[in-house]
Image (cartoon, rainbow, N blue to C red):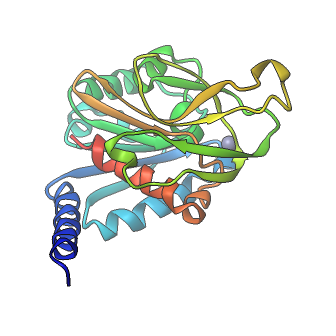
Amino acid sequence: MKKNTIYFLVLIIFSNISLSQNLNNKKILVVWGGWEGHKPELFASHVEKWLISQNADYKIVNGLDAYDNYDELIKYDLIIQSVTLSQISEKQINNLIKAIRSGVGIAGAHGGLADSFRNNTNYQFMIGGQFVAHPGGKVKFKVKMLEDELTDGLNDFEIFTEQYYLHYDPNVKIIANTKFNGETYSWIKDVVIPISWKKMYGKGKVFYVSIGHDPDEFMIHKDGWELLTRGFLWAIR
Ligand SMILES: [Zn+2]
């Protein structure tokens, strides 16, 4: 083997070690629920397989009861949420926001993170965006990776699913995007909207990917899954 090949292999081994070490002594909460059309339980089961592969200390819960108790919530290092629409109580949202501001990370995909609790602007302020439309329903579009440590080595890909049109915070760091072709609404032709972003909220990290109407998309589009799981690792306290 050539010297730089060996160097490359050592680099890969060490980078894998450092990724799995990120989950050592870390506690992860997976919260699923809300509108069943997004198959949140299936999403949680894909995430669970990954968490097992990472030797993570995790808990998976259906519904928002886990947000009832701040002292319990603050023990987690990352919350992975898949709850479309639904309602959150005043107490629950206050606990969640306080936990993220104090350093707990939050991450998720599609409507499970950016179309939860529609009437709660405090929640939207934290996440950094809100779904508003998916012109044409399911359509074919391109996911374009932008330069960032989380997209390093990942490829752009074409996907057939809902192309989320989001209202988003200019304070997010966009790491992947998509362009609308204007076939459904001519006035949004060539509008570029984020597919993925990362941001801070107080001491907490927020990570989002907009694909995933069907959680199995992440099993088909491996670069999408890789981006999502890198985001999980990045968002951990
Ligand atoms: Zn959807």
Please determine whether, in this image, residue 100 is positioned above or below residue 56: above
Q: Position of residue 172 (x, y in %)?
A: 41, 24
- Nearer the observer, 235 or 87: 235
Question: Quarter of the image containing the C terminus?
Answer: top left
Residue drawn at 30 percent across, 41 percent down: 235
Q: In the image, ligand 1 is in what quadrant? A: top right
Left or right of 113: which side holds 69?
Answer: left
Spot the residue most to the front. Answer: 2
Please determine whether, in this image, residue 222 is positioned above or below residue 139: below
Residue drawn at 78 percent across, 45 percent down: 139
Q: Position of residue 226 (x, y in %)?
A: 43, 57
Q: Position of residue 145 (x, y in %)?
A: 49, 43
State which quadrant residue 73 falls in. Answer: top left
State which quadrant residue 93 falls in. Answer: top left
- Nearer the observer, 90 or 233: 233
Residue drawn at 45 percent across, 23 percent down: 128
How many labels sit on residues?
0
Q: Position of residue 62 (x, y in %)?
A: 48, 49
Residue drawn at 23 percent across, 39 percent down: 72
Question: Quarter of the image containing the N terminus?
Answer: bottom left
Left or right of 72: which side holds 169?
Answer: right
Please determine whether, in this image, residue 23 is positioned above or below residue 72: below
